[in-house]
Image (spheres, rainbow, N blue to C red):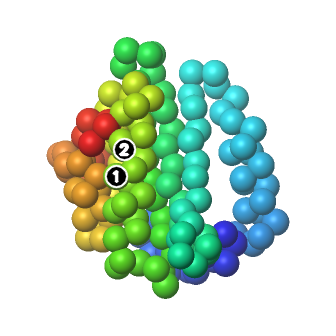
Amino acid sequence: MAVVLGDPALHAFIGGAPVDAAALRARYERLVAGSPDPDVSWCNWVIRLRDEGRLVGTVQATVTGPAHDRVAEIAWVVGTPWQGRGIASEAARGLVAWLGRQEVRDVVAHIHPEHRASAAVATAAGLAPTDVVHEGEIRWTGPAGG
């Protein structure tokens, strides 16, 4: 994943810079340990192409709220060589469907207003833009389950 996520172009809309393999390993160790808050669940997956057996990206959700009112904040990243093939859309749809089976009610994503590809992924996952802007990104929402 360090190679996939090491492309500076992936940070054009989200800011920051790629991290090295050691920093990525440390981040994954924190994610695997789980949230220190018992009311928050971190759900993280890598995206692997079946035919090639290659890792190409990630999807993630941070789930919060009481059982009857759970919300998931989601995100996705697909490495630049694999973009434009529908991989992120398929992964995001799968994530939203899975969240619905986990009794999550609503799904939220934040997308840079100029990032048309992520807007297309959000639309494919059943999300729609709102009028809310947070830290320069548009809040998209939709029901879990697709």
**Image position, residue 20 (x, y; %):** 75, 72
Element at badge 1? helix
CA neighbours of label 2 inside 10 A, class few (<14), some (14 to 19), many (20+) = many
Asked which quadrant contains residue 68, the reply is top left
Q: Is residue 115 above or below residue 59?
A: below
Viewed as shown, does residue 75 lie left or right of 51?
left
Residue type highlighted by circle 1: Arg
Position of the N terminus by quadrant:
bottom right
Residue type highlighted by circle 2: Val
Position of the C terminus by quadrant:
top left
Q: Who's the residue at 40% across and 65% down the image?
A: 88
**Image position, residue 2 (x, y; %):** 69, 72
Q: Who's the residue at 61% across and 74% down the image?
A: 54
Identify residue for label 1: 93
Identify residue for label 2: 96
Q: Is residue 81 visible?
A: yes
Viewed as shown, does residue 76 lie left or right of 115?
right
Q: Who's the residue at 62% across and 73% down the image?
A: 53
Q: Name the outermost residue toward the front.
A: 51
